[in-house]
Amino acid sequence: MAFSHSASLSLPLFSSPFLSPVQSQNLVTDNVSVVEGETATISCRVKNNDDSVIQLLNPNRQTIYFKDVRPLKDARFQLVNFSDNELRVSLSNVSLSDEGRYVCQLYTDPPQEAYADITVLIPPGNPIIESREDIVSEGNETEITCMAMGSKPAATIRWMKGDKELQGSSKVEVTYDRMYTVTSLLKFTVTKEDDGVPVVCIVDHPAVKDFQAQKYLEVQFRRPPATVQRAQPEASGGTLEYLSAQERKLQRGSDTGAPSKQEAFAQSLSCEGLEDKRREKWEASLCCLRQTDKPEVKIVVEFPQGLTREGENLELTCKAKGKPQPQQVNWVKVDDDVPSHAIITGTDLLIENLNKSYNGTYRCVASNSVGESYDDYILYVYDALTTTPIPTTATTTMYTTTSLPGITQ
């Protein structure tokens, strides 16, 4: 995937690689943005050519092509088209070292030059989304982070909660190899309506599309405590007290040890760990809450560690826990079937010999007696890296004069 933008002699050295076409007298070329590992094409075009010779130089001003002859012994450069009006050359398996300013030269009097800047784009790895806690109490603030690592240029991160866009704060770090890591932090207060709503981290980068990760909110609702009020207010304060079942039994003088139906119902609603003794009203109000035991699901990429490319294998593991432990874990592909040759072994999914038809969202679904949860993995298969011989360079010295020079091998 390459993106072309025109440049010429009239462009300043600091010009953007995304400018519109600009002519330099009779000679014009284009800036190119290309994803690492893919192919870039440089086109030197001449209008109203008077049989002048065209050549293409690399950023070190070594001749790549002189007319249709390639003095530079780098097999990744291949002639795509040569005519009186165009010299078009492709460069395969582009790497970061290929980035720079390439020169189109036209032998006229005086000679003309136009410049094609190649910008190499490196996509980020799969976004990593993490939350501060797995279950958030209603009314509390939660924090979710999303990280996009190892890209060039830096990616940007957006957030969606359901169908609503939220604003996060991003931090950009530059690594020693000129790569960028972006971390975005999202903070918001949780409501009970957020339970089960997906929070989606969307990574925008010129080298990739539809790159995202998501996490589903699990909200713990607050409920009033299960308590039994004394029928009459105490004479001392006139306020209602909260009594345990044992206190009420002793107060009645009962020796049967069997609570009434009302007491049994209250005990069944009481919170786990509530001590059988008198509690203050404010203490009782803190004893609540819903215990959510449906599974927590997370997909872990076992292989590869970097980008998923054609011809390689993909291995995912689904990690699920709950109370009780999930009885069933299934792999599905959203809106499509899992590839027929995919191997599912327990919680593991293995897809061999990837190709772009496998792109899509793969979902791990875990369930127990309490409920069902899932996590998604979005697969995007990149082009395979091409293997080429180690290039050797034959330096060609060209002299710019008004007459046509010979080729020095």
Image: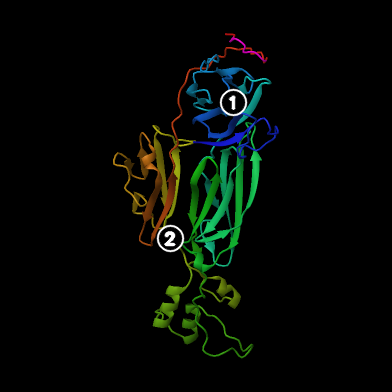
Compared with 66, 232 (above or below) is below
Residue 349's spot in the image, x, y percent? Answer: 36, 42
The circle on residue 97 is 1
Q: Are marks 1 and 2 in contact (CB under 8 Å)?
A: no
Identify which amino acid the numbered label 1 is placed on. Answer: Ser
- Which quadrant holds residue 32? top right
Q: Alpha-carbon neighbours of circle 2 within 10 Å: few (<14), some, or many (≥20)?
A: some
Residue 189's spot in the image, x, y percent? Answer: 59, 64
| Discs 1/2, front | 1
> Of marks 1 and 2, which one's residue comes earlier in the chain?
1
26 or 66: which is nearer to us?
Answer: 26
- Which quadrant holds residue 147? top right
Tell me the distance, in whole angstroms, between the alpha carbons under discs 1 and 2: 52 Å
Residue 406 sits inside the magenta stretch: yes
Residue 202 sits inside the magenta stretch: no
For mark 1, give the secondary structure. Answer: helix
96 or 191: which is nearer to us?
Answer: 96
Residue denoted by label 2: 293
Which SS type dominates the magenta stretch? Answer: loop
| In this picture, residue 62 sits left or right of residue 385 | right
Identify which amino acid the numbered label 2 is placed on. Answer: Asp
For mark 2, give the secondary structure. Answer: loop
Q: Which residues are magenta?
A: 402-407
Number of numbered labels in the structure image: 2
